[in-house]
Image (cartoon, rainbow, N blue to C red):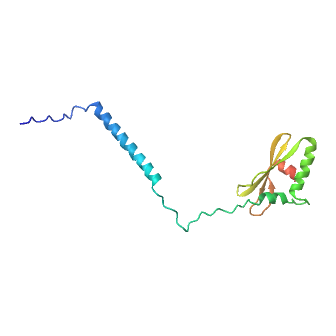
Amino acid sequence: MSLPRPKPDPARPSSPGTARSRMVSVFIVVNMAVAGWILASSVMPRAAPAADVAAATPPNACADAVGRVQAYQAPGQGEPLTDVIAANVAVEGLRRPVAIVGWEPPRVWRGDCEVGLQLSIGNELKTLRWAVRTDTGRVEALNDLAKQMSGW
């Protein structure tokens, strides 16, 4: 005949080692689930976009902005803007050293195209900035130095 087993006393708490081992096992299970999710999401194939959906690159509205600024003739001027700038750079060069560094690539700015020409004036880098309006094609100087060098 076997002795009856004593029933666990609900008033007596379980040992601290048992609670710790449960927390460690829950921690391990959660980490394994996260690792499995990461592995499955990186290995499983993803659905390709539909064949009729194409990501078309928008046309670059500013592609010819530098050429437009260079060829622009302000009202009352008989020569293109590059000639006027070159003449003003030469005049400024009589007072202090001036060098044309080069044209910056055009970028979209407030819906229009912004074009910049970098100059080294007295060993200080300056940028002349113009906006080419995308709706009218009109060229406008954005800073005082650009207005001065453009003869406006």
For the residue pair 43 and 135, the one nearer the viewer reads as 43
Q: Based on the displayed image, in which of its 4 quarters is residue 95 positioned?
A: top right
Point out the residue furthest to the left here.
1
Q: Is residue 88 visible?
A: yes
In percent of the image, x 79 and y 57: which residue is there?
66
Q: Position of residue 28 (x, y in %)?
A: 37, 41
Q: Is residue 46 left or right of residue 148?
A: left
In percent of the image, x 77 and y 51: which residue is there?
104
Q: Is residue 131 left or right of residue 47?
A: right
Q: Is residue 151 visible?
A: no
Vertical side of 137 occupied by 12: above or below: above
Q: Position of residue 131 (x, y in %)?
A: 77, 55
Q: How many marks?
A: 0
Q: Based on the displayed image, in which of its 4 quarters is residue 27 positioned?
A: top left
Q: Position of residue 87 (x, y in %)?
A: 91, 51
For the residue pair 107 and 102, the one nearer the viewer reads as 102
Check the picture and name the quadrant holding the N terminus: top left
Q: Based on the displayed image, in which of its 4 quarters is residue 55 positioned?
A: bottom right
Q: Is residue 107 left or right of residue 93?
A: left
Q: Position of residue 130 (x, y in %)?
A: 79, 54
